[in-house]
Amino acid sequence: MTPARGSSDQSIEGGSPFALSLHGVALIVILSGIFAATLSPYLNTDLWWHLHVGRIISNTGAIPAVDSMSFTAHGRPWLNHEWLAELVFYLVHRSFGIRGLLILVASVVTLTFVLVHIRMRRRGASPLVALILLVPAWIATINSIYLRIQPVTLLLLALFLLLLDEFRRTRRRALLIPLPFLMLPWANLHGGFAVGLAVILIYLIGEWLEARRKEDSALARPDLLALTICLVAAVIMSLGTPGGFETLAYPFRFITPNFFTD
């Protein structure tokens, strides 16, 4: 019997229960591989001082403002922009050991790629392409996804991009509401929070340019205003850290030429 016209397209796009199941199984296999690979026993040397600082915060109820761990910089002022992540890491390690930390970070990394996959599909990528691209995307992040704090930035960045894309696609302004509130913990977890501010700004500039060119896909003025308010609110929320303006300036000082980056 000759298959109906377009049936092959339906199978590729997940038009039948079998195709949906096949795609789901393939996705689970890839995500399981990412999770398992992130459980690597490789321990970054940063981990130990992060745990030590987390223990200090837990025991004293205060965030260290001066260096108490090194010899050459002992007593010098210290901006600890990762204090919340260090506290979480210490509490998890105290209760569940290294295995608990590995599972925590592996879960964060896997959820990141779940969001990446969703975003690719929402942007029109076929199921096959979205699955295949997860692998090189994961490989590109290998140097940042060991037992470190950086994976939280990858997760929140993936979430920010997904919400901004959905806002642009649906014009639902409620999708912008979580962004400033997510910025508050992000700014206390990792210095990469500046990337979140940058992507909102990039979206705003792009939408403003489309509006100037009167593109059909351009956002209406109320939507542009909502995106602007979102950016301003996110900047304000990023100041909700022990360092305040100093923490906000830190990522930008970090990327300018200095002894460390040189």
Image (cartoon, helix red, strand yellow):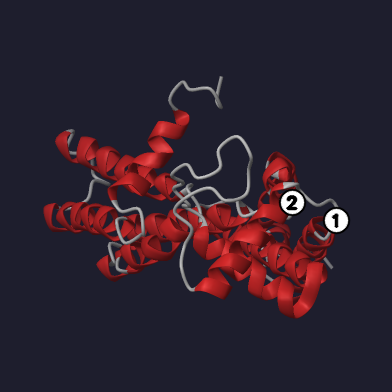
Residue 98 seen in the figure: yes
Query: Nearest the camera: 49 or 176?
Result: 49
- Residue 81 at what x, y percent from top left? 46, 52
The earlier-in-sequence mark between 2 and 1 is: 1
Check the picture and name the quadrant holding the C terminus: top right
Q: CA distance from mark 2 to mark 1?
A: 8 Å
Numbered mark located on residue 146 in the image: 2
| Front in this rendered view, residue 231 or 194 | 194
Q: Nearer the viewer, residue 20 or 36?
A: 36
Do the residues bearing badges 2 and 1 touch, measured as CB atoms within 8 Å? yes
Q: Quadrant of residue 13?
A: bottom right
User: Can you say whether 188 is above or below 259 in the image?
Assistant: below
Q: Residue at x 56, y 73 (%)?
A: 58
User: Residue farthest to the left?
Assistant: 221
**What residue would you read off at disc 1?**
40
**Mark 1 belongs to which amino acid?**
Ser
Tag 1: Cα neighbours inside 10 Å, few (<14), some, or many (≥20)? few
Can the viewer see residue 23?
no
Number of disc labels: 2
Residue 30 in the image: x percent, y percent? 79, 59
Image position, residue 104 (x, y; %): 70, 69
